[in-house]
Image (tube, rainbow, N blue to C red):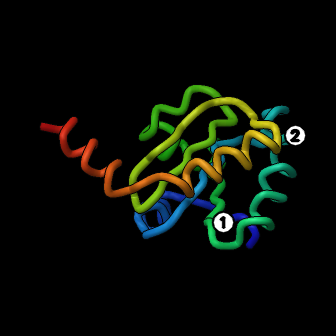
Amino acid sequence: MATVELTTANFDEVTSQEGIVLVDFWASWCGPCVRFAPVYDRSSEKHPEITFGKVDTEAQPEIAAKFDIRSIPTIMAIRDGVIVFAQPGALPESALESLVSQVEALDMTEVKEKLAAHEH
């Protein structure tokens, strides 16, 4: 599956669905972002069951502000509507694949229980 452009109009709808959504916060003027793009695209081809989204921080400053994105590229992983990972920096292909595996392996019942306990 190709990457999906995420905007203020579709971000919440796409990221709140069941399953895994990876989000790449980027900008066209950002060298590391441009170099990371082909790695991200290749991973999206390998994992058609995962939604790979991209947020252009120049075109969508509201989304970048909502998540306090201060450095790009930033990769965020969301599973079943819960942010389970967010880190600035372009990842090498092996690290991106490792991230995908780790997010797939999460026990979301346990994650949601810990989240609920933390909120009380």
Among the two numbered marks 1 and 2 on one chain, the one whose residue lies closer to the N terminus? 1
Where is residue 97? Give x, y as percent: 73, 49
Outermost residue, left side:
120
Look at mark 2 in the image and give the residue it sits on: 35
- Whole-percent x and y of residue 22? 60, 54
Q: Secondary structure at mark 1?
A: strand
Residue nearest the observer in this picture, 65 or 16? 16
Measure the alpha-carbon separation of dots 1 and 2. 18 Å
Amino acid beneath label 1: Val
Q: Residue at x 54, y 42 (%)?
A: 61
Instruction: Rate crowding at label 1 as few (under 14), some (14 to 19) or many (20 or more) other CA atoms within 10 Å.
Output: some
Sort mark 2 into few (<14), some (14-19) or many (20+) by Cα contacts within 10 Å. Answer: few
Q: Please name the residue shown 62% across and 66% down the image.
A: 50
Q: Residue at x 56, y 57 (%)?
A: 104
Residue 115 on image: x %, y %? 27, 43
49 relative to 84 in the view: left or right = right
Q: Which numbered dot is residue 4?
A: 1
Secondary-structure class at tag 2? helix
